[in-house]
Amino acid sequence: MQLCYLDESGGCESPDKNLTATPVMVLLGLIVNSSSIPALTRDFLVLKRSHFPGRFTKGFALDHILVEIKGSEILQMTRDRSRNQRRKADRFRYELLDLVETYGCRLVGRVWIKEAGK
């Protein structure tokens, strides 16, 4: 059996509506074979803990799945003046994509570029 995790980024508001409005709306699905989920979850937690260790100081191990690493945060690290932060963001992205590939996951999605006033 295959499962699909869906997530969105951006909103439906017009990009000129306010300062926090996003220029795009993205819908992305991650398709995973159900038999891979336990190992993928463990490896994903290892990845998150290795790149953001300060966020995982207490609680049960599986509670750590609730700690979000937002894409906007990775993007902010990519633009940081610190070369170390930029490298950290690159490593996290590459290792995350390697994890997705290792478990034979598929990504499907759509990006809508919003027009002003619509």
Image (tube, grey):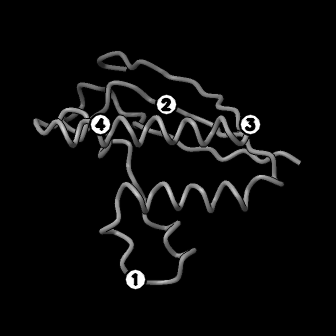
The residue lying at 63 percent from left, 39 percent from top is 100
Q: Secondary structure at mark 4?
A: helix
| Residue closest to the eye, 35 or 50 | 50
User: How many labels, in total?
Assistant: 4
Q: CA distance from mark 4 to mark 3?
A: 25 Å
Q: CA distance from mark 2 to mark 3?
A: 22 Å
Residue pointed to by mark 3? 104
Vertical position of residue 69 compared to residue 108: above or below: below
Q: CA distance from mark 3 to mark 1?
A: 32 Å
Q: CA distance from mark 1 to mark 2?
A: 33 Å
Sequence-wise first label, 3 or 1: 1
Q: Position of residue 26 (x, y in %)?
A: 49, 31
| Residue closest to the eye, 62 or 27 | 62
Identify the image quadrant of residue 75.
top left
| Residue closest to the eye, 34 or 12 | 34
Q: Amino acid at mark 4?
A: Leu
